[in-house]
Image: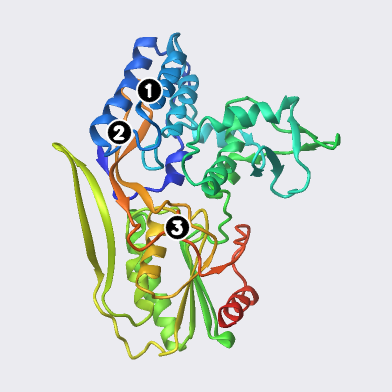
Amino acid sequence: MARTTKCISAFILLLATVTGSSKAYAQELLTPEELRADLDYYFTTLYSRHPDPYYFYSLSDFEERKNNIYAQVESPLTLQQFSWVAGQINSLVDLHSLTKFTFQGYSMDELVSAGEKVFPFVRIEEDRIFLKNDPVNPIAQINGVSVDTILADHRQYFNWKLPHEVTFRMMEAMFPVFVRFKYHLRSPFQLTFLDGTCREVEGNSIDQAIKEDPYGVHRANSSDFSYQIYPSSSMAIFNLNNFGNTVRNELADSFAKFSEEVNRQRISYVFYDVSKNGGGNHIGDIALNVINHDTIFFKYTMIQRGETGNRKYTASDKILPPHHDSAIPDDRMLFVIQGPKTMSGGDYFCRLVAENRLGVLVGQNTGEATVTFSLSHDFTMPHSKINFAIASSLMDFSEFFSSETVTPDIYWDVNHNREFTEKELNEIIRKWRN
């Protein structure tokens, strides 16, 4: 059975959690026939629903990699074991066609109540890994296991044909879970560094890890939407962390309050922070009414998979009608902060701003490719009950965007450990002026 989602977040797909798996079911062995049937269901669905299954790999390369996955289910496996096999599918496909394989066979409530801990957050640079709070000393071993071995294994769960920056950030997001549940290494972790020094470190609780978003982005406010106004600098920042359809009303309410406040105080500089926004639906459009603008359009080419095959068309959608409000100061400037965690609907928001010249993009390249897959449908494997998504459309934004992802107008090192301060926002404005 399929469920349609417009533009789902790759973050949620990668680190989806399981809340109801019983211990008995988790340890029950699935037969090779059942395992193959689950893999068959994924690939049959991919071939029948996806506009271009072989976009990243040739037919022969794709089939060879697929056969390597099938070769791992020749003996019975538990759900937990099979999840790590099914997760390798993600190395073949786009970010909207992933299997949701992590935490399969575990009860999240039981993990939290037991005080289970995962590895601390990390930074990964090519073939080296660092503790996030110690980005100088590369780790050589974790509990006696070579980091080279762990990283080589870890890499097979990611598609290296996608933009490398976002792939490394996704590796960092998954690494703490990978160390604990694939390698069964437990806290406290005994670390040996490349310089020969050793250290014992405690892991993060499951509860603490969940409070971080799947890229390890700390949210100071539990809401997906929060704002701060700095009247003395005539400046405000609105944190837009989620464009999922379930928060549509919350976004509308939050924006109405924000808009009323910045208009009442005649704020000149408005910042939107979407650097933590992994996407969702295209619900952020309303926030563009913080400035006066003419009709907002969006141009793209789409190849959409239907029951009779692919259909290609070029569109120029009318996103918003003209908006002119005397309460908005004539000199108001919009700045949008973006980064490699800005994907899907978050990336789309940045493209709207850039294409319609509505403001200034600040930060780093976004994490969504200019030619990307979208408009996903959700499915469930029949025996393991592992969920997955399949993209139904190929979106091409290259008529206006020539770069691999959306590039900023002003480069700024996005620090995802804290909210942007008034001082830093003023520095961005000064850099824009110069």
In the orientation shown, which residue stands out farthest toward the left?
308
Secondary element at image label 3: loop
Vertical placement of residue 253 versus 46, above or below: below
Mark 1–mark 2 CB contact (< 8 Å):
no
- Of the pair 272 and 196, the residue shown nearer to us: 196
Label 3 packing within 10 angstroms: few (<14), some (14-19), many (20+): few
Q: Position of residue 153 (x, y in %)?
A: 59, 27
Marks 1 and 3, the one that precedes in the sequence? 1
Q: Position of residue 1 (x, y in %)?
A: 23, 32
- Specify the label residue 63 is tagged with: 1
Q: Could you say which quadrant of the image residue 174 lies in?
A: top right
Query: How far apart are the alpha carbons under marks 1 and 3?
Result: 30 Å
Label 1 packing within 10 angstroms: few (<14), some (14-19), many (20+): some
Inspect the image, locate mark 2, and give the three-letter code of the amino acid beneath it. Phe
- Specify the label residue 403 is tagged with: 3
Q: Position of residue 355 (x, y in %)?
A: 36, 68
Secondary element at image label 1: helix
Label 2 packing within 10 angstroms: few (<14), some (14-19), many (20+): many
Identify the residue under disc 2.
379
Residue sitting at x 64%, y 36%: 117
Marks 2 and 3, the one that precedes in the sequence? 2
In the orientation shown, which residue stands out farthest toward the top?
75
Left or right? Give the position of 343 relative to 154: left
Vertical placement of residue 6 versus 248, above or below: above
Vertical placement of residue 309 versus 132, above or below: above
Position of the C terminus, as image quadrant, is bottom right
- Of the pair 198 and 253, the residue shown nearer to us: 198
Inspect the image, locate mark 3, and give the three-letter code of the amino acid beneath it. Ser
Mark 2–mark 3 CB contact (< 8 Å):
no
Q: Position of residue 215 (x, y in %)?
A: 54, 48
Inspect the image, locate mark 1, and give the three-letter code of the amino acid beneath it. Glu
